[in-house]
C-alpha cells in the first residue's frame, strides 16, 4: 500500500495552523492529541516537532494536565488587551485580502501596510498602527508587496541607468 502524501508547502502549513487556531475547541483538541502521544511514550520534544510547537509549550500542557486534569488543557481567560477583531471578522478580513484593494475603492493594486490599515478603519472601525497591520499581515500568512523600480536606460545621459518607480515608459 502506498503512503499517502499531501502538499507540504508553507501555504498549506499556514492554512492548517489557522484552522487549528480558529476556535477554542480546535486548540483544545490539538492539545489533547499532543498529550495522547506523550502518554503513548513519545517525548515532549518529538511531539512538539510534529505539532509545530515549542517543546516547552508541550511540557507546559503536560504539567497543566497533571495539575488540573482535562480542565488544565482548556482555554483560560487571558489578561491583557482584548483582540480588535473577533473570529468572524478575522475570516472576513482574510476573504477581503484575497481580493484586490481596488475592489474596495483603493487606488493600489496590491495590499500593503497603509492600505490594509485604512481598509480595517473603513470596513471594521478598527484603528491600528502601520506596524500592527504589518504584523497581522504576516500572521495571516501574507507578505506586503513592495513597489519595485523599473531600470530604464538613459542613453542620452551618458549610458547611466536610473530607477523609475511606476509604469515603465512606452517605447
Image: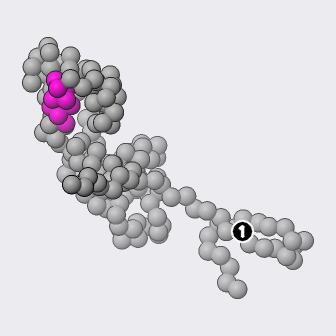
Question: Which residue sits furthest bottom?
Answer: 171
Displayed quadrant of residue 84: top left
Residue closer to the observer: 22 or 82? 22
- Please say whether residue 133 is visible from this viewpoint: no
Q: How many marks?
A: 1
- The range drawn in magenta is 30-40
Question: Which residue sits furthest front?
Answer: 1
Residue 99 picture location, percent across and down:
35, 67
Residue closer to the observer: 38 or 4? 4
Residue 9 picture location, percent across and down:
38, 53
Residue 65 picture location, percent across and down:
15, 20
Q: What secondary structure is the magenta-colored segment mainly?
A: helix
- Please say whether residue 106 is visible from this viewpoint: yes
- Above or below, comparing residue 46 to residue 139 in the picture: above
Residue beneath label 1, please? 151
Which residue sits at x=47%, y=69%? 109
Could you tell me which quadrant the N terminus lies in? bottom left
Which residue sits at x=13%, y=39%? 25
Q: Is residue 90 left or right of residue 70?
A: right
Which residue sits at x=34%, y=28%? 54
Magenta span includes 52: no
Magenta span includes 37: yes
Could you tell me which quadrant the C terminus lies in? bottom right
Amino acid at each position: 500500500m502506498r503512503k499517502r502524501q499531501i502538499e507540504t508547502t508553507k501555504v498549506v502549513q499556514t492554512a492548517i495552523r489557522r484552522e487549528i487556531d480558529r476556535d477554542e475547541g480546535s486548540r483544545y483538541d490539538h492539545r489533547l492529541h499532543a498529550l495522547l502521544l506523550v502518554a503513548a511514550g513519545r517525548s515532549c520534544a518529538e511531539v512538539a516537532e510534529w505539532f509545530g510547537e515549542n517543546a516547552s509549550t508541550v511540557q507546559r500542557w503536560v504539567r497543566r494536565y497533571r495539575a488540573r486534569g482535562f480542565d488544565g488543557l482548556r482555554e483560560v481567560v487571558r489578561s491583557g488587551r482584548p483582540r480588535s477583531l473577533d473570529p468572524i471578522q478575522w475570516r472576513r478580513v482574510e476573504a477581503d485580502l484575497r481580493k484586490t484593494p481596488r475592489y474596495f475603492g483603493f487606488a493600489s493594486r496590491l495590499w500593503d501596510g497603509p492600505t490594509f490599515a485604512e481598509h480595517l478603519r473603513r470596513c471594521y472601525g478598527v484603528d491600528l498602527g502601520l506596524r500592527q497591520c504589518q504584523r497581522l499581515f504576516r500572521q495571516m500568512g501574507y507578505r506586503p508587496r513592495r513597489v519595485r523600480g523599473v531600470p530604464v536606460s538613459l542613453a542620452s545621459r551618458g549610458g547611466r541607468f536610473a530607477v523609475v518607480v511606476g509604469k515603465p515608459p512606452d517605447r
